[in-house]
Every structure is written in C-alpha cells, then in structure tokens.
Amino acid sequence: MDKLGQVLHHITERRHFLVTSHTRPDGDAIGSTLALALILRKMGKSAEIVFGDSVPVIYRPLPHAETIVHTSRVNGSYDAAIILECDSVLRTRLQGLEEHFLINIDHHQTSKPFADVNWIDPSACAVAEMVFRLALAAGVKITPEIATCLYTAVLTDTGAFCYSPTSARTFELAKLLVEHGADPARIAQNVYFSSPTSKMRLLGAALSNLHREGIVAWMSVTRQDMHRCGALEEDCEGLVNYALGIAGVEVAVFFRETNDQRVRISMRSKGAVNVAGIAEKFGGGGHECASGFSVPGGLRAAEEKVLGELHSKLAQTS
C-alpha cells in the first residue's frame, strides 16, 4: 500500500478528526485545511480545523474560514489529528496534539516523518495538490467550495505560478479546479488586491531599509516599524518578494524583529540558490525557492549571521 493509500485507510477507519497546520498560516495552510475538512465531511466524517494563530485577513473570504478555531491547546475527543505542511508537532504551536494518532501530509523538501503515518511528496507544487489527489482517491466530488480553497492554496504557494516545482502538472491542476468552480480572477483579487493600509505602510518602512550586494538583496523592519505602521504579523507576508523583484537579484531576504527577542527571516530565490538548505541550518525549512526560520538575538546580529551563511553558500557554488 502506498502512502496515499495508508492515509486513506486510516481516515476510513476513523470518524472524528482534527485538522491543523503551521503557525503564521499562509494560503496553502488555510486553503488546504479548509478543503480537507470539507472532503472529510463528504466522506461522512466530522472535522474541526484548529490553528495556533488567527486567519490572515486576505484568506477570510474563503468558504467556511469563519469556522476555524484559534486556540493554544487542543480540547476535545478526536480519533486522529491530520497535520498539513509541518516538520514537527511544535510547528503547530498547539499543545496536546501529541496525545492523538497523527497523520502528517507535507510537500516541503525539509519535511520529516514525525507522525504515526507520513505522506511526504516534495514533487507536489503545494500540499493542496496532495489534498486534491486524496479527494480523487476517496471518490469525493470536488465542489466549487473545495475548488476555491485548493486553487487559493496552489496560487499562493507557487508564488502566483512563479516558484519551482511549478510545471505543466500544476497548470493542469489549476485548470481542473477552475472547471470545478474556482473563480481565478476573484481569488487573485482577494489575495493580491485586498491588503490592509497597515501592510502598505509597512512595505514603505521595509523598502526604506533595502540593501543590495550583487545578486543578494535584503530589507528589514523593526518592532518600532511594526508599531508605527499599526501592522500585524500577517502584514509581513509577501514583502520579501519586492526585493526579489529587482533585476539581477537572485536571492532576497526579509528580516523582522519579533517581541520575544528573536528575528524572523523569510528567504526567496529565483532558482539559482536553494534557500531551503540555508533555512534548515537554522532550524527552519520550506521550499527550494521559498523558506523561513527564526534566530535569537537582535536584528543586526541576525543579518550578519544569515547573510554570512548565504554568501558562504554562494561562494561554494560560484
């Protein structure tokens, strides 16, 4: 039995499910958990979505997003917990998960088999692609609501079809989701043209701290910047792409001071550099072209440490 078959077997054998994903949930995490919960319910199961962080504003228009529970501890009786896009239980920031039977579904290159059942496929463009395949294997009809959630996940996790492993298979998946009711124009408007004013102000602060050395560009925001702009953590999503959009830049890094004496780092690549490998060295992970992690200490120390590692990697590959 292959991994997909194992996952489907354990879902079939159980009835009550908790579905979750990582902290600071992105479009793939939100869209895929919503779609999976809908699929489970169509299979005659009960499914509750629980996150350690709240749903970002741009994803709240998704079908049933208002049903997602935001808490720090799992309460309730579940036959299994299905965790999407995580390399460990810790990434969910949910206490009590380890007491349940765990099913891990992930597509990240840096993923680890931490659960009772692990289905990991780095060739998938997003975990949404794996959820779609699960629905087909279970014989579940893809409704417009499921298609909308999955299309949002694919769109955002591929960087609007800019990151590898975007392929003909990715566009075939997008085509199928549109045929099943996803509205690509409306979804794109919700994701890319619905930013709060605070995010635009924060972008200005980040661009004022933009630096470039050769093919590397980086920018940063401080706690004071976040406070002055009235910005939330979710407002930082995607800002790194503005640095990556510079002609001749192959790698971009975004640094953000947090309130717990750490610095959060997001890295993006146009493909010449595997940023997931760098993230993994600092305890993070992700895709070859998009990854993230955090380091303790101040902003300047984090910049020196991370940029030093990046330049060292570039020197080895030149």
Image (cartoon, rainbow, N blue to C red):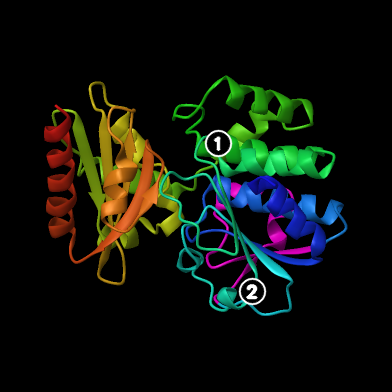
Left or right, 14 with respect to 113, comes to right
Where residue 93 sits: x, y (%)? Answer: 49, 70
> Residue at horizontal 13%, vertical 59%?
301
Q: Quadrant of the C terminus?
A: top left
Name which of mark 1 and mark 2 comes first in the sequence. Answer: 2
Are there few (<14), some (14-19), or many (20+) residues within 10 Å of tag 1?
Answer: many
Q: Start and end of the magenta stretch?
A: 46-72
Q: Is residue 283 above or below residue 146?
A: below
Depth order, front residue of 200/267:
267
Q: Which mark is residue 139?
A: none
Residue 184 visible from this viewpoint? yes
Using the rendered view, name the quadrant where residue 317 is placed: top left
Mark 1 element type? loop
The residue pinned by badge 2 equals 100
In the foreground, 55 or 48: 48
Query: How many residues crowd mark 2 within 10 Å: few (<14), some (14–19), many (20+)?
Result: some
Q: On screen, 60 above or below 177? A: below
Give the numbered dot on residue 124.
1
Image point (54%, 34%), residue name: 125
In the foreground, 267 or 206: 267
Q: Amino acid type of disc 1?
A: Ala
- The x, y position of residue 291, in whole percent, is 37, 45
- Is residue 232 among the parts visible in the rendering? no
Residue type at numbered disc 2: His
For residue 238, which quarter of the picture? top left
The residue at 76%/55% (across/down) is 9
Is disc 2 placed on a helix, strand or loop? loop
Which of the 4 image quarters holds residue 52? bottom right
